[in-house]
Image (tube, grey):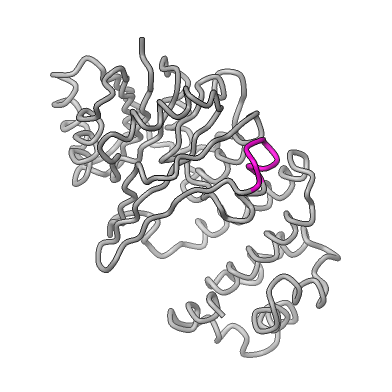
Amino acid sequence: MIKISVLIPVYNTAKFIRRCLDSIVSQSLKEIEIIVVNDATPDNAMEIVREFAANDSRFVIIDKKKNEGLMCTRKDGYSIAKGEYILFCDSDDYYLPGSFSMLYDKIVETNADIVVSGYRYIPVKGQGYEQISKLPFGNNRDAAFESLLRKKIPHNLFANIYRRTLFENHTYTCKPNCTNGEDFILFYEIISNIKTIEALNTPTYAYCQNKESATNASLSKSAMKCIIDNRVNWYEWLPKAYSNHHLIEENMINDLYLKFVAGYDRSMLESIITSLGESLTRSRIFSILGPLKGLVMLSFLKNIPGCRVLCSNHITRLILTRI
């Protein structure tokens, strides 16, 4: 019996894939399948994968003829998964020792649809940290949405274990070449189909920053547009899945502020501004953001000259984010 299917998309991660696979094949829980989806990677990462697969029958390899991005690559993986449960792993990250057993035992014990755990963030330089997921509002579907929107649990796919039927019985968004915010979309859609969720209050995963990662590169205008389009679609979808519209609106206003501070052009953000509509009042903005951020937001919305200069360098942007 296959207890867990581990899904690993591979694209341009030859420097890191051996570390990733070593962490998986050395897990104490052995009843797993390792589904590696080759998203037409241009490097020699798949040579390393095939080296592992030659000596381990648990490997399943899917070779795609053209690159389609993480959203479609993950779907290719979970569509053929045979395990009772599913784990996601990015090929430049890795799982901590004993993680599979801890996650599997917890989800079997609780009979939950998802168990979320913590992760260790490992930067290229400097001090890392641990992020632990919490469920302070309960363990049903609406409580999970509240925990997500209040940032008690991150919206990443990794470090969590999922009942396979969540993928068998439901259809999720799949946009080819969607490379920004794709995990955000899928995680929320999965949450909309659960009955119960539980938390494992320990890190199981190492989330590693690397210089080549797309998340560390400066965003192009096309990438920014992709992120905005995804957010606007999410804003339209979420109220149909979750009834606390006040909390959704609060998140939208915070998101608009952060994107302005991050350097998005006003023209790119018009669709979010339009979605918020009449809720963008002075009193509402100040009640959510506070006085200092509120003034910055109002200056941005009114196109006050010099407002954009506030976000012209990294230090200023960091200050505006943390005030």
Residue 144 lies in the magenta-colored region: yes
Looking at the image, residue 194 sits to the left or right of residue 81; the answer is right
Q: Is residue 132 above or below residue 27?
A: below
In the picture provided, is 245 more to the left or to the right than 22?
A: right
Quadrant holding the N terminus:
top left
- Front residue of 260/148: it is 148
Q: Report the label total.
A: 0
Position of residue 182 measured from the top left corner of the image (x, y, whole percent): 51, 44
Point out the image quarter for the C terminus. Answer: bottom right
Q: Is residue 141 left or right of residue 33?
A: right
Q: Residue 226 at what x, y percent from top left?
A: 56, 52
Magenta-tinted stretch: 137-145
102 or 237, nearer to the observer: 102
Furthest residue toward front: 109
Task: Tell whether position 23 is magenta.
Answer: no
46 lies above or below 273: above
Q: Residue, x 24% and y 29% (percent of image)?
A: 27
Q: Position of residue 62 (x, y in %)?
A: 33, 23
| Residue 257: percent from left, percent from top | 63, 70
Q: Quadrant of residue 216?
A: bottom left
